[in-house]
């Protein structure tokens, strides 16, 4: 695991700092807006299966329009591509709907604190299901992540088991999404933007029948009327905003995967959670106890530590810029 100094470091093939800065600022800003509108909608319209479906539908529609109008080039795909994308889409769908169910039950900040534990899931799944061994420092770096998330969960004022489990399931599903896309994307030439577009479309097909079965048009119609009578006609714009911004932040994050190293991406994702946690606490006046905030800080610091330890120990193995090579 000693770094191979004869090979150029990933940093050499990255974009100039200013461009990375622009990517990150856009990604975080879009993500914050998505999270705020998503929660505003869920507060008055608690149907996360429908809102998750609408996010995927908005993205699919936007991308179809941009392909038809040639704003973006449509990808050249074959049956093999869609076949390898299928398990990725199943994991993406589960991860997305589970996170949205979580956010419908607990504060946005709490969902994201638990979601900052994703690296721990990644290492544990790789270790116990795939049999990959890691050096001791990697396991040790997981302790603050797990400890911080546990402390935060134990002291969360509005703890709810469904909300907690939703975020945990989302973590697990996204680990599998990364593992499957790592297998499926090797050697493929579809851009990050189009890859995410195809992922949205397939996920939409998978999710729609489940959303109808779990919630269904009758509940949606009653809920919608209630929400409109409470908020007014502007409610529809909240739904549009959460749907469109969900696609946009994911699109930017997948586009940035083409341009930056796994380490930079992983740090960017952690910073994104900090922006979401802080802004949602301010906007929704979420009550936070000092010990709860301490847990969040330790967990987030842990993810930084993990990415640093992992990068120091495995530079030799990190050849590409695709974060799917990052466990
Ligand atoms: C979702 O709804 O898919 C989650 O909010 C995604 O979370 P993440 O992109 O921040 O991991």
Image: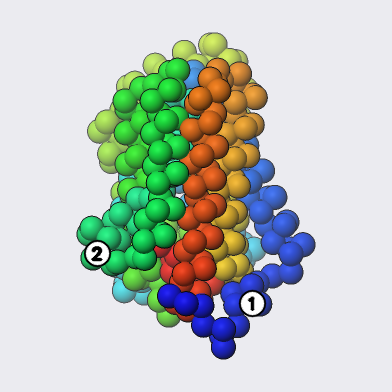
In the picture, the disc for residue 13 is: 1
Circle number at residue 277: none
Q: Is residue 73 above or below residue 239?
A: below
CA gap between label 1 and label 2 equals 30 Å
Q: What kind of colouring is applied to the model shown?
A: rainbow
Tell me where residue 4 appears, x and y as whole percent. 51, 82
Q: Nearer the viewer, residue 26 or 325?
A: 325
Extreme-bottom residue of the structure: 6
Residue at 52% across, 53% down: 305
> Which tag, 1 or 2, sits closer to the chain's start?
1
Question: Considering depth in this image, is 273 or 222 the residue closer to the camera?
Answer: 273
Image point (66%, 54%), residue name: 24
Residue position marked by numbered label 2 in the rendering: 130
Instruction: Give the farthest residue toward the right.
Output: 18
Give how far across and how far down residue 74 sits, in percent.
53, 68
Marks 2 and 1: in contact by CB < 8 Å?
no
Could you say which is closer to the camera, residue 157 or residue 1?
A: 1
Residue for point 66% across, 77% down? 12
Give the position of the N terminus as an image quadrant.
Answer: bottom left
* Few, some or many residues within 10 Å of mark 1 (<14, 14–19, 20+): few
Residue 103 visible in image = no
**Badge 2: residue crowd in 10 Å (few <14, some 14–19, many ≥20):** few
From where the camera sits, is residue 22 visible? Answer: yes
| Quarter where residue 286 is shown | top right
Question: Quick check: 192 above or below 141?
Answer: below
Question: Which quadrant holds residue 70?
Answer: bottom right
Q: Residue at x 39, y 21 (%)?
A: 159
Q: Secondary structure at mark 1?
A: helix
State the SS at label 2: loop
> In the rendering, at what x and y percent does residue 96 appear?
40, 43
* Residue 208: percent from left, percent from top: 33, 42
């Amino acid at each position: 695991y000693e770094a191979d100094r004869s090979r150029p470091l990933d940093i050499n093939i990255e974009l100039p700092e200013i461009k990375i800065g622009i990517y990150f600022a856009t990604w975080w800003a879009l993500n914050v807006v998505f999270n705020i509108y998503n929660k505003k909608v869920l507060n008055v319209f608690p149907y996360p299966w429908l809102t998750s479906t609408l996010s995927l539908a908005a993205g699919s529609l936007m991308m179809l329009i941009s392909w038809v109008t040639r704003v973006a080039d449509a990808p050249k795909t074959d049956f093999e591509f869609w076949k390898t994308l299928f398990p990725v889409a199943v994991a993406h769908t589960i991860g997305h709907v589970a996170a949205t169910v979580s956010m419908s039950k607990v504060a946005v900040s709490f969902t994201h604190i638990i979601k900052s534990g994703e690296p721990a899931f990644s290492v544990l799944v790789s270790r116990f299901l795939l049999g990959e061994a890691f050096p001791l420092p990697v396991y040790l770096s997981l302790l603050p992540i797990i400890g911080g998330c546990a402390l935060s969960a134990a002291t969360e004022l509005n703890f709810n088991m469904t909300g907690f489990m939703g975020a945990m399931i989302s973590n697990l599903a996204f680990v599998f999404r990364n593992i499957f896309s790592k297998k499926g994307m090797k050697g493929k030439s579809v851009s990050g933007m189009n890859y995410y577009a195809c992922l949205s479309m397939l996920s939409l097909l998978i999710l729609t029948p489940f959303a109808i079965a779990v919630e269904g048009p009758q509940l949606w119609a009653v809920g919608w009327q209630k929400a409109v009578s409470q908020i007014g006609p502007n409610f529809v714009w909240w739904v549009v905003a959460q749907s469109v911004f969900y696609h946009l932040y994911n699109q930017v994050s997948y586009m940035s995967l083409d341009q930056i190293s796994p380490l930079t991406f992983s740090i960017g994702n952690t910073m994104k959670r900090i922006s979401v946690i802080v802004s949602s606490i301010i906007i929704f006046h979420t009550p936070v106890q000092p010990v709860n905030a301490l847990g969040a800080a330790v967990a987030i610091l842990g993810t930084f530590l993990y990415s640093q330890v992992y990068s120091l120990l495995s530079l030799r193995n990190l050849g590409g810029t695709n974060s799917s090579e990052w466990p």
